[in-house]
Amino acid sequence: MRVLVAEDDNDIRQGLREVLESEGYEVIEAADGVEAIEFFNSKDPEVALLDIMMPGKNGYDVCREILKIKPALPVIFISAKSEEIDRVIGLELGADDFISKPFGVREVIARIRAVTRRAFLSRSPEQRDPEQVEMGALTIFPQQLRARKGEETIELSLRDVRILMLLLRERGKVVTRELLFNECWDMNFLPNSRTIDQHISKLRKRVEDDPQNPEIIRTVHGAGYRFE
């Protein structure tokens, strides 16, 4: 899923990029409002994060223009402005949410997951993931970025869902690290990277009844992972 991040502060923009990429999003960076419009037209993002005070065009103007073209696009305003009137203007323009600087990583993740669920619902039926799938004792709700294990609800990142859906699609087959990288990371990592193993370890702790004896994400030593 492509996310447009329009922010003139390079440090904040890079920080948002790192957070979003860690969740599994493809980030399109714009340093001003004019670039934001250009990238919106050329890259067709599914979510937009817009700073309000930017050179060229401010976030409000960018929001007006992109929602004329794509009215269902989820938009989050990110700005140092925190007065109530700014929130009202942003929401009246059609924005879904408003985050004030400084903000925490968890806050950004929670809000981006919320608008991602809305973005999934705006997709055509043939583009949508199934509403729910079963992997052993785990029930996954891909469009909600959630899973259920017994009575426990588990929040998932976009990357978590991609990994689980790939294992389900390749049920009974070995899913190599290279395939996981290509389909779930959208970037080129070296085959000996520990990134995938660390992510799988964290995911197991949340979805497996016994992470030491996994039933959903089994290790195939020297090859990859498999779901039976």
Image: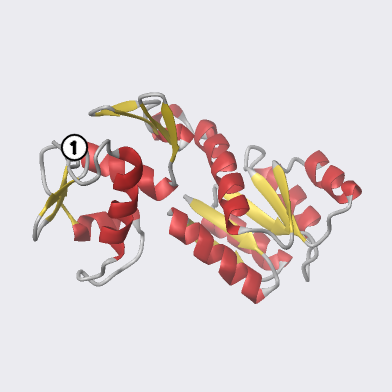
Check disc 1 and give the amino acid type: Glu
Number of numbered markers:
1
Residue 37 in percent (x, y) is at: 67, 60
Q: Residue furthest bottom?
A: 10
Q: Identify the residue at image location x=57%, y=71%.
A: 14
Colour scheme in the image?
Answer: secondary structure
Q: Identify the residue at image location x=26%, y=43%.
A: 166
Left or right of 209? Residue 67 is right
Q: Where 210 falls versus 86 (above or below)? A: above
Q: Identify the residue at image location x=54%, y=33%.
A: 122
Residue 138 in percent (x, y) is at: 30, 30
The residue nearer to you, when weighing 4 against 22, is: 22
Q: Quadrant of residue 12?
A: bottom right
Q: Secondary structure at mark 1?
A: loop
Residue 181 in percent (x, y) is at: 28, 59
Residue 164 in percent (x, y) is at: 29, 41
Left or right of 221? Residue 104 is right
Q: Identify the residue at image location x=10%, y=57%.
A: 223
Q: Residues within 10 Å of mark 1 (few under 14, many from 20)?
A: some
Looking at the figure, which quarter contains the C terminus? top left
Left or right of 39? Residue 7 is right
**Residue placed under numbered mark 1 in the picture:** 215
The residue nearer to you, when weighing 135 against 35, is: 135
